Amino acid sequence: MREFVIKVKGMVCNGCENRVKNALNNIDGVENVIADHTTGTVTVNANSEVLESVIKEKIEDIGFEVVKED
């Protein structure tokens, strides 16, 4: 099991959190998703087959911006 913590811009309410959770839970291998609009983070627990790039792409596909880490 791996954990990804991703910074996300654009989540402003519980509805946004639910959109992110629902989208990411549809990815095969994702076990748990915690989205928090107050901190702007999404925490994803997934099996080793799930790529971080797939998670980030799904977040952006539903209209949120993944913050690039320097």
Image: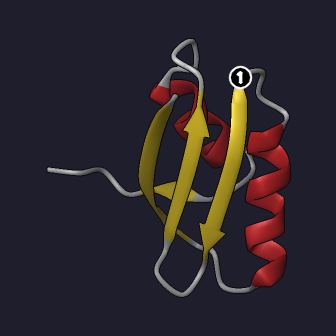
- Position of 43 compared to 26: left or right? left
Q: What is the x, y in percent for residue 10?
A: 58, 73
Q: What is the x, y in percent for residue 38?
A: 54, 87
Q: What is the x, y in percent for residue 66?
A: 46, 53
Q: Which residue was labeled with disc 1?
A: 29
Q: In this view, does 45 lie above or below 65?
A: above
Q: Regarding mark 1 in the picture, which secondary structure is present there?
A: loop
State the residue in front, 43 or 17: 43
Residue at position x 60%, y 80% in the image: 37
- Position of 47 compared to 17: left or right? left
> Mark 1 Cα within 10 Å, few/some/many (few <14, many 20+)?
some
Count of numbered tags: 1
Residue lying farthest left?
Answer: 70
Q: What is the x, y in percent for residue 49?
A: 57, 12
Residue at position x 74%, y 42% in the image: 24
State the residue in front, 55 or 3: 3
Residue at position x 76%, y 72% in the image: 16
Q: In this view, does 10 lie above or below 1?
A: below
Residue lying farthest front?
Answer: 1
